[in-house]
Amino acid sequence: MSAFNIANEALGGQFLSRLNMDLRETRGWSYGVSGTQSILPNGVSYTIEAPVQADRTADALAALSADVADFLGSKGMTPTELDLAVTNSVNALPGEFETSGALLSGIMRNDLMRRPEDYYVRLPARYKSVTATEADRAMRAALDPKGFTWVVVGDGAKLKPALEKLGMPVEVVEAR
């Protein structure tokens, strides 16, 4: 999953990711967007968190959908995104093991994923060997935007008309 991790860094996993740069830096609609994955032996769940201005909710959802489609389509990872993602991933590794609990979690992840004990020792070299093509292929294999469920929290009466214009099914669930 090294290639997928690198692809995620570029799409949504770091501050300079495509999703964050679009909604936060380019459009100014959010204080921060992130994409995170949960990798399990039999699948991947992918979550995009994008707190946005209420009046830009539908626009932001359309932009996120377009950004993901572009990344998975003809506008995959760029050389700059690859370099930033690899550098960030390698440099972040030591910080993942700062506590005994974090170290134990790493050991447990290795066991769950049936990885060798020296997995994390070899990971920097693996990250550095990932190509943009390999990262794109891994992300495309793992994510299918047609299967996404978008959860929008806000005033349904105000948001529903704009969301319906996107052509996506809208279901309103009242807060309890």
Image (cartoon, helix red, strand yellow):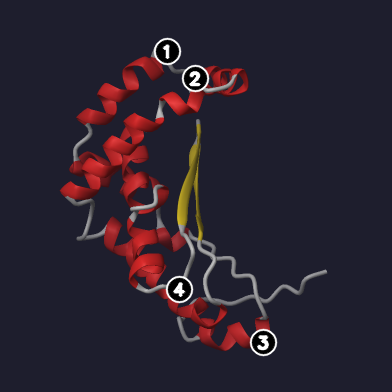
Placement of the N terminus among the 4 image quadrants:
top left
Give, as a three-letter code, the residue at label 2.
Asn
Q: Mark 3 vs mark 2: which is more N-terminal? A: 2
Mark pair 3, 2: CA separation: 47 Å
Q: Where on the picture, by quarter, is residue 132?
A: top left
Q: Where on the picture, by quarter, is residue 89?
A: top left
Q: Measuring 38% from the left and 60% from the top, which residue is drawn there? A: 19
Residue on which the image places disc 1: 116
Q: Position of residue 119 (x, y in %)?
A: 39, 17
Q: Which element is circle 1 on?
A: loop
Give, as a three-letter code, the residue at label 1.
Pro
Q: Is residue 122 above or below residue 157?
A: above
Residue on which the image places disc 4: 29
Q: Mark 1 vs mark 3: which is more N-terminal? A: 1
Mark pair 2, 4: CA separation: 38 Å
Q: Mark 4 vs mark 3: which is more N-terminal? A: 4
Say which mark, if any, is on residue 110. 2
Instruction: Determine whether label 1 and label 2 are within 8 Å by CB.
Output: yes
Give, as a three-letter code, the residue at label 3.
Ala
Q: Mark 1 vs mark 4: which is more N-terminal? A: 4
Give, as a three-letter code, the residue at label 4.
Trp
Q: Which element is circle 4 on?
A: loop
Q: Is residue 139 left or right of residue 175?
A: left
Badge 2 crowding class, 10 Å Cα cut-off, few under 14, some 14 to 19, many 20 or more, is some
Q: Mark 1 vs mark 2: which is more N-terminal? A: 2
Q: Position of residue 10 (x, y in %)?
A: 32, 49
Mark pair 1, 2: CA separation: 7 Å
